[in-house]
Amino acid sequence: MINLVKNLSVYNRRTKSSVIRELLKLTNQPGIISLAGGLPAPDLFPVETMREVVNSVLDKYSAAALQYGATEGTPELKAELVKLLKETEGLDLKPENILITTASQQGLDLIGKTFIDASDPILVELPSYIGGLQAFKSYGAEMIGVKCDDDGLLLENLELKLQKLLEEEEHYKFIYVVPDFQNPSGVTMSQKRREQLIKMSEKYDVLIIEDSPYRQIRFEGKAPDMLYKLDKSSNVISVFTFSKIFVPGLRLGFMIGHEEIIKKLSKMKQSLDLCTSPFNQLIAAEFLKGGYLPSHIEKINASYKSKKDAMLNALQEYMPKVEGISWTKPEGGLFLWLRLPEHIDTEVLFYEAIKKQVAFVIGSAFYCDKTGNNTMRLNFSYPSEEQIDEGIKRLALVVKKFL
Amino acid sequence: MINLVKNLSVYNRRTKSSVIRELLKLTNQPGIISLAGGLPAPDLFPVETMREVVNSVLDKYSAAALQYGATEGTPELKAELVKLLKETEGLDLKPENILITTASQQGLDLIGKTFIDASDPILVELPSYIGGLQAFKSYGAEMIGVKCDDDGLLLENLELKLQKLLEEEEHYKFIYVVPDFQNPSGVTMSQKRREQLIKMSEKYDVLIIEDSPYRQIRFEGKAPDMLYKLDKSSNVISVFTFSKIFVPGLRLGFMIGHEEIIKKLSKMKQSLDLCTSPFNQLIAAEFLKGGYLPSHIEKINASYKSKKDAMLNALQEYMPKVEGISWTKPEGGLFLWLRLPEHIDTEVLFYEAIKKQVAFVIGSAFYCDKTGNNTMRLNFSYPSEEQIDEGIKRLALVVKKFL
C-alpha cells in the first residue's frame, strides 16, 4: 500500500478520532444508562404513516420517483416547504429561496465549501454544535469563540471579537448560531438578542448561519422570531432537517436564503452528490401534503416534555445543593446542560461515571477554545423516564465524590 | 446582502456554470431529440419490486430502518455486497473493506477530501468523467491528462507524465480511471493494459481510483478483471453506484479498499452527511437478498444492447463515409463517442444541431486540457430506438454541412 500518512490531505491528517467518539465507544457496554447520545426516540417514528406515504409516492409518481432529480430539490417538496414556512414562521419564500440537502449536516458542509478558504475566521458560540465545527474545520476555518449565557450569544463579546478581527484586517466569513434549544446547551436565544444580532450583522456586514434542527420541538413558552424573519438585508441562511420532526433515516434537510446565495450553494452541491434522493424527497412531500406533520410534532413534544421534566425533577432531587452546580431548563429540544464547580474536570469524572454505569458527553468537546471542562451535555430524548431517573441518581453520586 | 463575490471561497468563485450545463439547457426545448443526457431508462425501473422490497423493510426492521445509522454503512447491506462481489468479481472482502456512500459522486468527493491538498497533481484520462474532475477540482487538484485509445489509458504516456512529475518533485496523489465502458467514451480498458497499469502503480507507488458505475452493464464480450482484483498491493480504491443497476433515485453507492484507507475515507464522510440513508440502504440490501438483481440487470442489458445496436446501425447508415469520422463500439454502458475531422469544432456544430432538433454533449467538456474539440458524446440508454435513428439522421445532416 502507498504510505498513507504521506498521501493524505492536511485536513485528514489533522482530524483526530475525536475524544467524544472514543468516549462514546465506552457508553455502548451493557448495563450503562446513556445520557450521551443525541438520537430521537424511535418509538415515536411514524412507521405506519411512512408505509402509507411510500406506497402513495410509488402510486402517484411511479418510475419518476426513482430517477435522478434536480440538484436544487424536487418542486413538490419545495412547494410544501414554502407553505409550511409561511404557516409556521410567517416567512414569504419562493422555491428559489430553498435548497434541499442530504440532511442538515450536508447543509453545514455546503456552507463551508461555499464560503471558507483556509484560515478564514468564523464566529461560533461557546459551546457550539460539534457537527458544524467539524464541517467548517474541514475547509480550514479558524474558529473564534463567542461567550454565551442562558439567553444565548453575548452581543458585547461578539462585537469585541468582530472589532478585533477588523483591526487585524481579517476577513470574517460568518457567525454560526443554533438559536433554538441549542445543541449542546439547550439554550434559546432571546427575542432581544436576536434583534441585536441582526443589527450587528448589518453593522459589520456579516452573514449569519441560523442552524435550526430543533425549533419545532418546543414543549412550552413562546417562540421568539426566527433570525431569518427578523433580517431585512438577506444576511441570514437558515438550515433545517427532517431528522427531529419526521425521521433521521431519510437523511433529508433543507436550507433557505437569498436566491443568489442559494444558487452559489447549489453549484457546490453538484459535486457533492448531484442531488438528494428524489424518492426520499417525495416521501417527505407526501408526508407534509397529507397533513401528518402537526399531530406528529405534538406527539413528539408531549413525550420529550415529559422526559425533560423527569430529568429536571431528578436533577433537583439528587444533585448536591452546592454553589457552582446548575443546569439549563430548556423549553424544547433534546438536551440540557449541566455545569459543575470549576475545579471538576468532566473528562476525569466521565471514567468514574462509566464505572457507575452512566454516560454523558463531556462539555469541552463543544468548545472551540478547549474550555468548558466543568460542563456536560445530557440527552433526554432517547432514554426512558425510568432510565433518566436512575441515570441522574447515579450521576449525582459520582458528582458528590468529586466535590 | 453581504458582497457575495468578496465572501465566496476561491473554489466557488472559480467554478463557472460549465459550458455543458449551459448547452444542456438548450436541449430541453420541445421537439429536440436529446442524445446529450446520461440518464438510465426509467421504463426499466423495477417499480413493483421496489414496492415489495420497501414494505418488507418496514415489516422486518420497523422504526430501526428510520433511525440514524453507522457512518460506514449498515451491516445488512455490507454483508450482501461482500457476497455479491465474491460471486460476480471473485473478490474476497470483509465488511471493513466497504464504505457505503450517498451514491458514487459522494465517493469521488470523499476521495478528493481525503487525499487532495490545493495544487496536488492527479492523473486523469483524456477524456474523463466530468463529475470526477469537478469533485477533485473542488479540492484544488491540478489535473494532468493522460492520452487514451480504444483500449484505454496509454501506459507509455502515463509513465512519461509520472516521470516528469517525479523530476519536478511534485507529489502526485492518484490516477483516476473509469475502466469499463467509460463515461464519456464508452471505451473499456483491455486486460493487458490493466495488468500494466497495476505494475505501474507499484513502480511509481501511486494509488489508483477505479470508478466503476457501468461494469455490470455489459451486453457482449468478456469482462477483463477488475483493477481491484489484479492489485496485490492494496493500491486500488474502487467506486460503485446502484444508479445504473437498480435506481438512481435512492442515491446509493459504495467504495471498496484496504481497511485502513476505508477508515480514513469514513472519517471524512462524518462531516459530509453523518451517514447514508439507512432506509435506502436496507431497501438495497433487501433487493439483493431477494435475488432480484441478476434478472434486472439482464433486462437492462437486453434493452441497452438493442439501443446501442440501433445507434451503431444509424451511424453506419447516415454518417458520411470520409476520413476522420469514426466512433467507438462499446460492449456495454450508456455512451458512445463520435470523432469528427480535426477542423470541426463540435461546440460550433452544437448550435447548428440544436436548430435541426438534435442534441449531444461536446467532447471538449471532458478534456482537462481543453482539447477534444472535434469529439462528442452520444447517449443511447435514454432515447427510444426510433429517437436514436431519427436523431443520428439529423446529426449526420449537420455533420455533412461542416465537412
Image: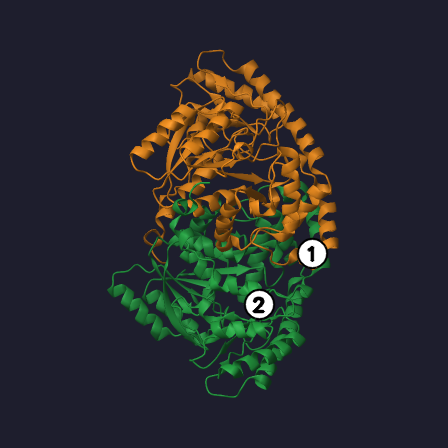
Chain colours: A green, B orange
Specify the subunit that label 1 lies on: A
Point out residue A127 in the picture as x, y percentages from the top left corner.
44, 70
Point out residue B157 in the picture as x, y percentages from the top left corner.
39, 25
The residue under label 1 is: A50
Query: The N terminus of chain B appears in which quarter of the rendering?
Result: bottom left
Query: On the same chain: label 1 and label 2?
Result: yes
Image: A379 above or below B92: below
Residue at image position (62%, 52%) is B278
Please tell me the numbered disc located at residue A209.
none
**Disc 2, SS:** loop
Camera sees residue A64: no
Query: The C terminus of chain B appears in which quarter of the rendering?
Result: top left
How packed mark 2 is, by other alpha carbons closer than 10 Å (few <14, some 14-19, many 20 or more), is: many
Q: Separation of disc 1 and disc 2 at Cα? A: 20 Å
Image: A282 above or below A183: above
Camera sees residue A129: yes
In the image, A181 versus A64, the foreground residue is A181
Report whether B179 appears left or right of A305: left
Amino acid residing under circle 1? Met
Amino acid residing under circle 2? Gln
Residue at image position (40%, 40%) is B173
Point out residue B316 in the picture as x, y percentages from the top left corner.
56, 15
Image: A231 above or below B298: below
Point out residue B369 in the picture as x, y percentages from the top left corner.
37, 31
How packed mark 1 is, by other alpha carbons closer than 10 Å (few <14, some 14-19, many 20 or more), is: many
The residue under label 2 is: A216
In the image, B265 versus A271, the foreground residue is B265
Quadrant in which residue B47 is drawn: top right
Residue at image position (47%, 58%) is A17
**Disc 1, SS:** helix
Specify the subunit that label 2 lies on: A
